Image (cartoon, rainbow, N blue to C red):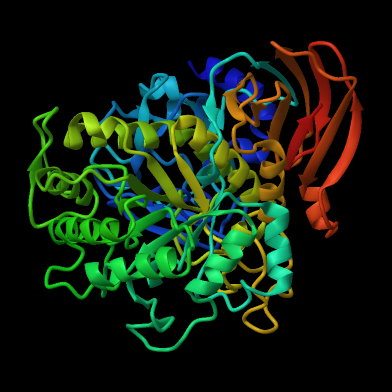
Amino acid sequence: MRWWTIGVVAVLSGAALADEFAHPAVYRDYPAGRWEDWSWANRDMRNTNPVYLGQYSIRVDLYPWSSLFFKNRDGFVVDGFSHLEFWVHGGTAGNPNFRIGVEVNGIDRPLVPVQNFVSTIPANQWTRVQVPLSALGVNPGDRLTGIHFREFSGQTVPTFYIDEIRLIRAQVSARALATVNFNAPGRTITQPMRGINVAAWDWFLTTPERRELLKQLRFGLMRYPGGSISNEYDWRTNSNRRYGGGYGTNTDGFLSVASETGAEKLICVNYGSGTPQEAADWVHYANIQRNGNVRYWAIGNENYGSWEHDTHPHRHDAHTYAHFTRDAIQLMKAVDPTIKVGVVGVPNEHEFPQRFSVTNPRTGQTHNGWTPVLLNRLQSLGVVPDFFDIHIYPQQPGREDDAFLLDDPRTWEEIIATTRQILRDYLGPAGETVPIFVTENNSVAYNPGKQTTSMVNALYMADSWARAILAGADAFVWWDLQNSAEVNNNNSSRLYGWRQWGDYGIVAAGYPPGVGDPLNTPYPTFFAAQLILRFARPDDVLIRVVCDNPMLSVYAVRTPQGKGRLLVINKMRSTAITAELRVQGMRVGNEVYWRYYSAAQDTTKTKGIATRTLRGGGDRIRHTFPPMSVSVLEW
């Protein structure tokens, strides 16, 4: 057993170090991604000596039956991953006696002695341990919800240290083979599938400079007046009802900019401190008085969350919200019957518990989360929303991990499928066709750190957009156009990026003064958005592409004129990938235009997307894509 394991370690060592973006962390100076510290053991997650890599390690003092335990409540699907890797320091005593185990779908699998995977853990030095997931009872398709380092013999274990815990991808390669069938079915691109959030607080939205930047991007949908301020916003006075003070862009300004750039419009009415009549009055002003043609309207923003302003007797209450929605829809559509009015929710049945419980008609299970209670009440009121609005932020602040973020777009299939099933369950046949709108997406939920302004977030943006649309999202709206620079969040050296500040915006706000880039400076996400525009336009058909390298995401569109384009995202940090792209159902032109933006361009502050011409022809393209790059191929 030990000889076999040592052989595996030797074989894996090259792959494990091939590219750090391939292997998502569980602990890397802090519990990473969606992993949380749920230990029952004496431990220090910010131990400063000894440290294998980075700034911190974990000091572990196991008392009898205790466990250093990492929990992932959403679960990590292990498809494509083969090993759990960590580094252990034996402390002054050496050879700490503990067991390794995992929790799969909330159920513990048998614990395995660490000695099964490493012959000795010497004192006063670091040793790498790679544990096959299969040895822990993990099978392909399993959902990893917990990882144990546990004492299970009733003994006290002398102090030892653990660092750099991560999941190892089974295959990491500098080559890729992708096959695209341009005759395959796909999803037709619509205007709302390429959206951006704009805000009342943006004092520069209506300026000529900002209008020109937006013309370069041609977003298909703009959402206004912002996130949480939607529930504080007085549209009549363009001011904040909760804190006072005015804003830079009013309804007229928003309508002007969106119309000039050809975007559809989505307005979030004030649920938290407004009334249904106030929402109807806004529809009348925007669409009747100003002829603004605002097609989409949402009832509030994240009304389930305690962070939202809510003046109702029962705050953040799905029952109250459902009745408000019924009244608002009746009044709003009486003004303009052509509008679409949506409700906000979350893609599961358990988050944000309510004062009522309801029964899922299909499963018979009882739930009291926001979404099931809301949909149950809407169904009983005879209300079918015109769309269901969700927000997705993969990570919590302070836990950002680049490899985790770049792996996360694969979760869209489950997010959208789960949301669709919940809509079917509670709304019946009508739930089959209610559009699913993703009106906020970015890398981290709040307090953005340097990852948001790095090339990593641009890679995530492009990959997340394509996966969400292919999974079934009917709208995709990035958060956001302009925000502000924030310097006191996660700027860890363990994260890629040279900017030592975070910013949700795709262009710099120039605020606070002296922090971040000058006003309107594009961040990498700006160029990713530009390339998405080059790749996919309304009426194009987005097609799934089969690629054998998980670090190279490839997507295709077929235009109404029968032409083809490819979107290629190399998610490796330092490894160029040479790909053979095989084309079926179409011939490649003699000249292939390659437009791209990469980390190298961002690092040198090169302005704009690079364009090159490749030689093509026949049924395939062979090309080497630089590390950390977004590319569009067109012929």
| Along the line of sight, the residue nearer the viewer: 303 or 137 | 303
| Along the line of sight, the residue nearer the viewer: 22 or 351 | 351
Rendered location of residue 436, percent (x, y): 38, 41
Rendered location of residue 326, percent (x, y): 18, 55
Above or below, comparing residue 408 to residue 177 in the picture: below
| Along the line of sight, the residue nearer the viewer: 218 or 33 | 218
Above or below, comparing residue 260 to residue 544 in the picture: below
Image point (85%, 45%), residue name: 610
Rendered location of residue 155, percent (x, y): 27, 43
Above or below, comparing residue 173 to residue 473 in the picture: above
Task: Kindly give the residue lying farthest to the bottom in the view shown.
Answer: 245
| Along the line of sight, the residue nearer the viewer: 419 or 293 | 293
**In which quarter of the view is residue 474 placed?**
top left
**In which quarter of the view is residue 465 placed?**
top right
Image point (9%, 57%), residue name: 355
How many numbered badges does the structure rendering display?
A: 0
Decide if residue 205 is on the left or right side of residue 209: left
The quarter of the rendered structure image containing the C terminus is top right
Residue 100 at least partly seen: no
Rendered location of residue 613, percent (x, y): 91, 32
Above or below, comparing residue 215 to residue 564 in the picture: below
**In which quarter of the view is residue 615 placed?**
top right
Image point (50%, 35%), residue name: 469
Decide if residue 252 is on the left or right side of residue 598: left
Decide if residue 606 is on the left or right side of residue 250: right
Residue 241 at least partly seen: yes
